[in-house]
Image (tube, rainbow, N blue to C red):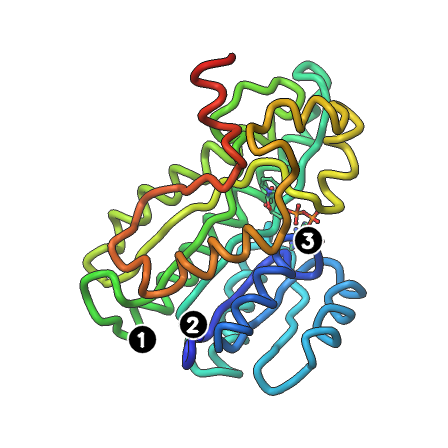
Amino acid sequence: MRLVGKTAVVTGAARGIGRACAERLLAEGARVVIADIDSVRLAETAAALGNTDTVLAVVTDVSDKAQVEALIAAAVSQFGRVDIMLNNAGIAMVQGFLDVTKADYDKVLGINLEGAFWGTQAAARQMIAQGQSGGGQGGVIINMSSINSGLANPNVATYAITKGGMNQITSTAAVAFARDGIRVVGVGPGTIDTEMIRGDFVASATDRTIIARTPLGRYGTAAEIAAVVAFLASDDASYITGETIYPDGGRRVLNYVMP
Ligand code: NAD
């Protein structure tokens, strides 16, 4: 119960990692605003979370700056403040580098990179307006990056570009807002067993290859990512800002010894 009295906003919360994070933040005592472009799955998730007075669902397309600002406004209108912003919504397109069209490029960058940028900006603006206590114990903005932020995987070039860029949103915003008491951190999961991974990614690799590249020898779970998010959102992480943490079963460090 590290987050009692806090309000968290989670994008891409209708399923997968975002949903697990919403569940965990609620379990830690926070009020949670869940946002997603998929209104049907979002409503199902809201019902599963209990539809209580601690949960608000807001249909949002994070690639639209105005909708992201409206999301923050809805959170403030319902719960009075925003303490935790999790920019989690994301998509991947598995395709060859030369096959990427302008529409593909705009779509992936719009959702993953712009979504995180506008989410960071809107949340920081609200957190500053609230007046945070200094020293890193005020608001927290968390960007859901990926191990692909640092891998040269040409089959997901647009995705990798956005995740590398998200790490830069994390580090630049961390410095921009440090003196306002806001921490900005990233989480870079390895392969996590969600519908996203069971779709294009596994089709393009195979379970066996992915597991062979993961020293811990298995996929991660959405709950394991949510546990890292809950830690970073809490005052237990009060001296961490600007960093992206990699819960990846050892996959990233394996690349240092076994390219
Ligand atoms: P998922 O596809 O299961 O869930 C993503 C959610 O984002 C969906 O509910 C979807 O409707 C929503 N979404 C898509 N476009 C949106 C938009 N424009 N506006 C608002 N919501 C939108 O994926 P997941 O595996 O849970 O991934 C969540 C995040 O974690 C993503 O940013 C992904 O890149 C990242 N990630 C996942 C893995 C993994 O292995 N699953 C690894 C590293 C990083």
Residue 169 placement: quadrant: top left
Question: Would the CB of label 3 be found within 8 Å of ligand 1?
Answer: yes
Instruction: State the CA–CA distance, disc 1 to disc 2.
Output: 8 Å
Q: Mark 3 vs mark 2: which is more N-terminal?
A: 3
Task: Tell me which residue sits at (38%, 69%) in the image.
Answer: 126
Which residue matches tag 3? 16
Q: Position of residue 113 (x, y in %)?
A: 52, 41
Task: Give, as a three-letter code, the residue at label 2.
Answer: Val
Q: Position of residue 177 (x, y in %)?
A: 26, 55
Task: Tell me which residue sits at (40%, 41%) in the image.
Answer: 244
Number of the front mark, 3 or 2: 3
Which residue matches tag 2? 82
Quadrant the N terminus occupies: bottom left
- The image's mark for residue 32 is none
Which residue matches tag 1? 130
Tell me: 244 left or right of 226: left
Instruction: State the CA–CA distance, disc 3 to disc 2.
Output: 23 Å
In the displayed structure, would residue 27 be above or below residue 53?
above
In the displayed structure, would residue 238 be above or below residue 28?
above
In the displayed structure, would residue 145 be above or below residue 67?
above
In the displayed structure, would residue 2 be above or below residue 199?
below
